[in-house]
Image (cartoon, grey):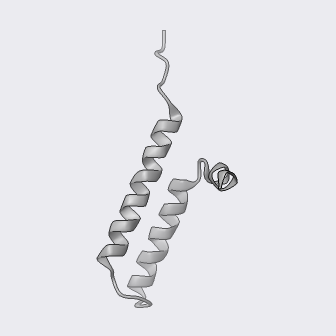
Amino acid sequence: MIQVWEFLKGRKTYLMAAVIGLDATGVALGWWDDGKLRQITEGIFTLLALRSGISASGPVAPVK
């Protein structure tokens, strides 16, 4: 599991953007119905990925 997280480091937000894009394409083409629970789940995982990126970047040192 640690290897998976190491692989996803720096890629989680891009992965969620691709998943949401694929989902929107599938809904637009009529491959599947628009599901509110799926949208909520995608939004939660996207926010978690963004939060992970914020905490990983750390504070910026002031410029002197």
What is the residue that sits farthest to the bottom in this orientation? 30
Residue placed at 46% from the left, 39% from the top? 54
Residue placed at 66% from the left, 49% from the top? 6
Residue placed at 42% from the left, 57% from the top? 46
| Total marks in image | 0
Image quadrant containing the N terminus: bottom right
What is the residue that sits farthest to the top in this orientation? 64
Residue placed at 59% from the left, 53% from the top? 11
What is the residue that sits farthest to the right in this orientation? 3
Query: Relative to 32, does residue 60 appear above or below in the rendering?
Result: above
Query: Relative to 39, does residue 7 appear above or below in the rendering?
Result: above
Query: Relative to 19, does residue 53 appear above or below in the rendering?
Result: above
Q: Kindly indicate the quadrant of the structure image that contains residue 34.
A: bottom left
Most foreground residue, 53 or 62: 53
* Location of residue 59 in the rendering, given as x and y in whole percent from the top left corner: 47, 26
* Location of residue 23 in the rendering, given as x and y in whole percent from the top left corner: 44, 76
Query: Relative to 20, does residue 51 appear above or below in the rendering?
Result: above
Q: Kindly indicate the quadrant of the structure image that contains residue 28.
A: bottom left
* Location of residue 22 in the rendering, given as x and y in whole percent from the top left corner: 49, 75
What is the residue that sits farthest to the front in this orientation? 1
